[in-house]
Amino acid sequence: MYRKSIRIIFIILSILACTGCAGPKKDVASDKKRAEAFQNLGASYVREGKLREGLGNLHEAVKLDPNNAELHNQIALVYMDLAEYDASLRHFRRALALKPRFPEVQNNLGNLYLLMNRWALAIASYQKAVDDVLYKTPHFAYTNMGLAYYNMANYEKAIEMYQRSLKVEPTYSTTYFNLAYAYETTQKWEEAILAYQKAIQYLPNDPAAYYRLGKLYLKLDRKREASHVFEQFLDIAPKGPYEEEVKEILKTIQK
């Protein structure tokens, strides 16, 4: 996947304006500090969900520190959240131009391409991320690559990517959930059940895994298991979006 008081930033700017006789090195250092202040403030706004305010401060930061690859990455992520994909793409590319070996950005760029339904480009970006031996979280990129292959209807390749992810991080619940979904699509029912159970094991408060597992049991006419899982679903998500549907299912199968 940034903040400080605006008042403090204005004070910093006024002090800097009064010290114009400082040498070039001091000016550069001052710009870096001012950029960091804007960056922190922008990050704070983004965390609060105030994306436009955050973006404005991040742009002020990048004016002062235009060769900061991480700043361009942060700006790109905000644009991506705003669904302004062309702007996001520009800043991801700028980040990579400044720092070609930046696997986290390659993964983020892959996510952008995924949102744009540009599956092949997404896969290429994820592959660059996992090929970097310094990338600390390749399971993210493998899982995302699996999703890209799934969207291309290449289900076996998707399963392969999910399995690679789990070799790196065998407790990552999201991968198990996606793997289960791929197994369902290919009608590998028992494998899907086991994968959903693993997803629940490593993230027991995720209602989506209970819901999908319950629906799968129902499809297989395994009503006792379905009933048990749906009751667990209601325990952890009593006011969730599928609450009424699950209650109706339980009424039907528990008659």
Image (spheres, rainbow, N blue to C red):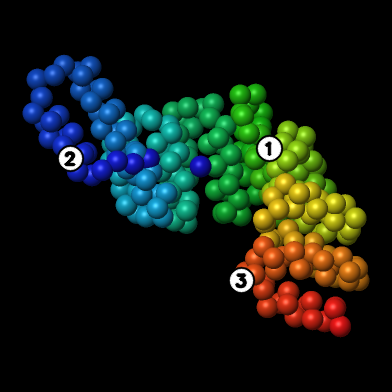
Element assignment for label 1? helix
Decide if residue 16 is on the left or right side of residue 178.
left
Q: Quadrant of residue 17?
A: top left
Type of residue at label 3? Answer: Lys
The first of marks 1 and 2 along the sequence is 2
Element assignment for label 2? helix
Q: Residue at x 34, y 41 (%)?
A: 3
Type of residue at label 2? Answer: Phe
Q: Residue at x 29, y 27 (%)?
A: 32
Q: Residue under circle 1?
A: 139
Q: Residue under circle 2?
A: 10
Q: Where's residue 48, x and y in %?
A: 40, 53
Above or below, comparing residue 9 to residue 210 in the picture = above
Type of residue at label 1? Answer: His
Above or below, comparing residue 156 to residue 170 in the picture = below
Q: Quadrant of residue 247?
A: bottom right
* Label 2 close to label 3 by CB (< 8 Å): no
Q: Residue under circle 3?
A: 239
The first of marks 2 and 3 along the sequence is 2
| Circle 2 residues within 10 Å: few <14, some 14–19, many ≥20 | few
Q: Residue at x 29, y 41 (%)?
A: 4
Residue nearer the viewer, 113 or 237: 237
Q: Where's residue 84, x and y in %?
A: 44, 54
Residue nearer the viewer, 203 or 86: 203
Q: Residue at x 57, y 54 (%)?
A: 115
